[in-house]
Image (cartoon, rainbow, N blue to C red):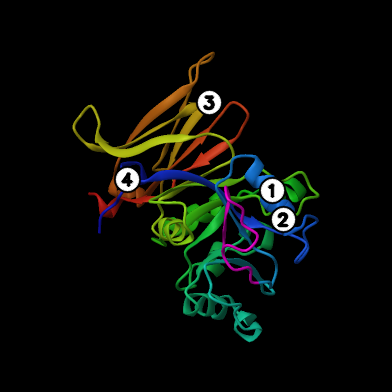
Amino acid sequence: MSWTSPFTLPGHWYKGNLHTHTSQSDGDATPQQAVAWYGDRGYDFIAITDHQHHTPGGTFARHDLLTLTGVELNGDSYHLIALGCSALPDLAAQATPQGCVDAVLALGGMPFFAHPYWCGQTPEQIAPIRGITGIEVYNSVCERMDGLGNSSAYWDALLSQGKRLLGLAVDDTHWRHGEVGVGFVMVRAAALTEADILSALRQGHFYASTGPKIEDLRLVQDATGHPALRVTCSPCASITFYGHASYGRRIHAVQGELLDSAVCPLRHEQVFLRVECRDEQGRIAWSNPLFVEDVL
């Protein structure tokens, strides 16, 4: 296998929120109000993901904001965001996480487990599920309400097992907790169409953020000629490369200064390497993982 950095691809960057509730389920804003809020603030797309309510792509869209097909499916021990499904999966299929994922895939959709930390859904429960695309590494409303929005440790536990899962940052907007406009993804796609955005998401051609920008991420050689991963970002207080166990590294800015780049050599012991860029306000940008076996 090989690794492709989205920063080396042709196309454009598009900003979006992939977890949005409206008055179709338990949100306090109408779909039209949700579209207006995000469109007025420069977002390029959102997915309307109401509970057990399938909203086709293009519904409620306006000229400057794309809506993606979405739904949130709820089981006893899990919640799942499904993007791009052709229909609502049968309730019977949602009785188990694997049944729900299988139903989403059969309908052409892309399944992500939502806020696993908040749900109490452990890495041990997620690991056996086949066909899952990824998890929400950050969920704004869960962080705002209960401090359970950051599932990055769960993500790392799964990546350490070789589970090739992508990470989303989302608002999970309900319009009453002050959570809106926090978590988002930046997607590198050929064009602002549902097919292109979903294809880019499926391939991991995006990063997640609550504020900082990742400007570039690519393979280089370090000073000794060893393969390394280099990130360039908006000014940040620290840059952390996460790998299996303690095989990553954190670089802190010198007092009174900020960082805009860092490099980490690749080692087989890391299993994977992903980057978090944290700014002075504590906001974070998350890259998707590179699996070391793909490049060494």
Look at label 4 and name its amino acid: Pro
Look at label 3 and name its amino acid: Ala
For label 3, the SS is: loop
Where residue 127 appears, x then y in whole percent? Answer: 49, 67
Number of the front mark, 2 or 3 = 2
Number of the front mark, 2 or 4 = 2
Residue 221 on the magenta segment: no
Look at label 1 and name its amino acid: Ala
Q: Residues within 10 Å of mark 4 (few under 14, many from 20)?
A: few
What residue is shown with label 1?
Answer: 36
Q: Residues within 10 Å of mark 1 (few under 14, many from 20)?
A: some
Distance from Cα at disc 4 to Cα at disc 1: 29 Å
Distance from Cα at disc 4 to Cα at disc 3: 30 Å
- Residue 81 visible in the shown view: no
66 vs 118, left or right, is: left
What residue is shown with label 4?
Answer: 10
Where residue 2 appears, x then y in whole percent? Answer: 25, 54
256 vs 164, left or right, is: right
For label 4, the SS is: loop
Where residue 121 appears, x then y in whole percent? Answer: 62, 64
Q: Is residue 72 above or below residue 273?
A: below
Q: Is residue 110 above or below residue 6?
A: below
What residue is shown with label 3?
Answer: 237
What residue is shown with label 2?
Answer: 32
Q: Which residue is pictured at 64% across the width and 39% down the height? A: 41
Contact between marks 2 and 1 (CB within 8 A): the answer is yes
Q: Which residues are magenta?
A: 54-68
Q: Main secondary structure of the magenta part?
A: loop
Look at label 2 and name its amino acid: Gln
Contact between marks 2 and 3 (CB within 8 A): the answer is no
Split into 4 quadrants, where in the image is the N terminus? bottom left
